[in-house]
Amino acid sequence: MTATGASQDAAARTARRGWWWWDRRRSVALDVGLGLLSALECASEGVEFAGDAGLPVPAGVLFGLLVGAVLTLRRRWPIAVVLVSIAVTPAEMGYVMAVVGLYTLAASEVPRRIISVLAGMQLLGTFIVTFVELRRGLDGDTDFDPGLWYVPTLALFMSLGMAAPPLFFGLYIGARRRLMESLRERADSLERELSLLADRAEERAEWARREERTRIAREMHDVVAHRVSLMVVHATALQAVALKDPQKAVKNAALVGDMGRQALTELREMLGVLRSPVSKPKEEPAPAPEAQAVQAAQAARVAPAVEEAGPSLADLEALVGQSREAGMTVVLSVQGDPRLYAPVVEQTAYRVVQEALTNVHKHAAGAETWVRLAHRGGEVAMQVENGPSDAAARDAGLPSGGNGLVGMRERVTALGGVFVSGPTDAGGFRVSAVLPASG
């Protein structure tokens, strides 16, 4: 199965993995750069923090460097980064870490409940620190009276402005990322389904081609076996009467010629279907897997060749007449009102009678034969029965492939009909078939 771009990207990401928790080099560069920027910011703010806390300046700078460098771990431990930023908020440092850490947390796979709690803590810590700093600054200015709500409102807006944008942007990026992953999974699943569909369609197409080859072979067997059997019978009779009755010999020779021409005509019609020209398409790029599946499904539907115009029940009289001309005693009886059936039903009924008469020529030379056809409500029935073979009749020496009865049974059962054959008590043989009218 051909891999899609989504699966190839996933495989490439897996192959590139090896930089600890990063999957790409640019991710390493980005996080290290952000960690360096945050460390420099916290180091500069650590100078003021050291002065307010009464610590040596180098200690404040070192503390700021360590705190700011935590941002490098944002992809691996986003919760820890946000907790560190909340912890250093009273020291008035880590603003870059607070913004980037909150964005990373919101875009990660951390449960929404934890994101909400940590975002609320970040907002509350920023609000308190901002409120205290504003109040401290205004206490030293006696000329400005801001009012009761000025400091809380300003502190709220500043804390919201610092926490809300990274939070919502991170939630959007996380949702978009999950959507893309879902689309990749659906694309891979669809690709697998299309590949399976293409395989099944190809199997159906191959099955249809086998069925069509079997059908053509059966048709050729019916035509060749019956016509050639009659030709051999007439040729045998011609050999017997050539010197005694020249006129009958001429008649038999003409019948042999007619039979040969009819056999060639029917074979030519069937072979013409196989030889129908197919235009060679121009070279085109290989279709996509989904297009291959559709093409294979279409090939499965159209694989069988178009049925050629075959014989029908109306041709039974001529068929029986050919056997009579070959010297066979055949009685044809029809029950019910004749009507039109599906072409495949009429052709199958004709072939059953044809093959049964051919078997009589082969195996029961000189036997009296009865052909019965019955038109019923929703079906048509046919029966070919012959009596015992005439011992005085000369054996034509026709070979038997043993596939005649098998072919008849396959034809009938393929249409949902019933086929029965076997010897009779009188020493003959009977072939019976019933076909549904609709096929």
Image (tube, grey):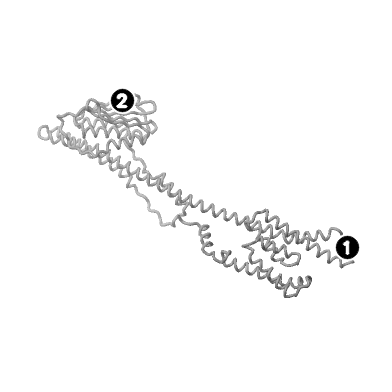
Up/down of 156 relative to 319, above or below: below
Compare residues 378 and 122 and report the one nearer the observer: 122
Q: In which quarter of the image is residue 247?
A: top left
Task: Give the residue displayed 32% in from the left and 30% down from the top.
Answer: 433
Camera sees residue 13: yes
Compare residues 281 and 344 and report the one nearer the observer: 344
Where is residue 362 drawn, in percent x and y? 21, 35
Q: Of callouts 1 and 2, which one flags the residue occurring earlier in the amino acid sequence?
A: 1
Compare residues 416 and 251 and report the one nearer the observer: 416
Where is residue 276 drawn, in percent x and y? 34, 47
**Mark 2 burial class by Cα count in 10 Å: few <14, some 14-19, many 20+:** few
Asked if residue 199 lies left or right of residue 16, the reply is left
Where is residue 313 drawn, in percent x and y? 32, 31
Residue 334 has which mark? 2
Asked if residue 307 lies left or right of residue 362, the reply is right
In the picture, which quadrant includes the N terminus?
bottom left
Task: Give the residue displayed 48% in from the left and 49% down from the top.
Answer: 193
Return the residue at label 1. 145
Kind of residue at disc 1: Asp
Q: In which quarter of the image is residue 377?
A: top left
Q: In which quarter of the image is residue 107?
A: bottom right
Q: How far apart are marks 1 and 2 (CA)?
A: 120 Å
Where is residue 336 drawn, in percent x and y? 34, 24
Asked if residue 287 lies left or right of residue 32, the reply is left
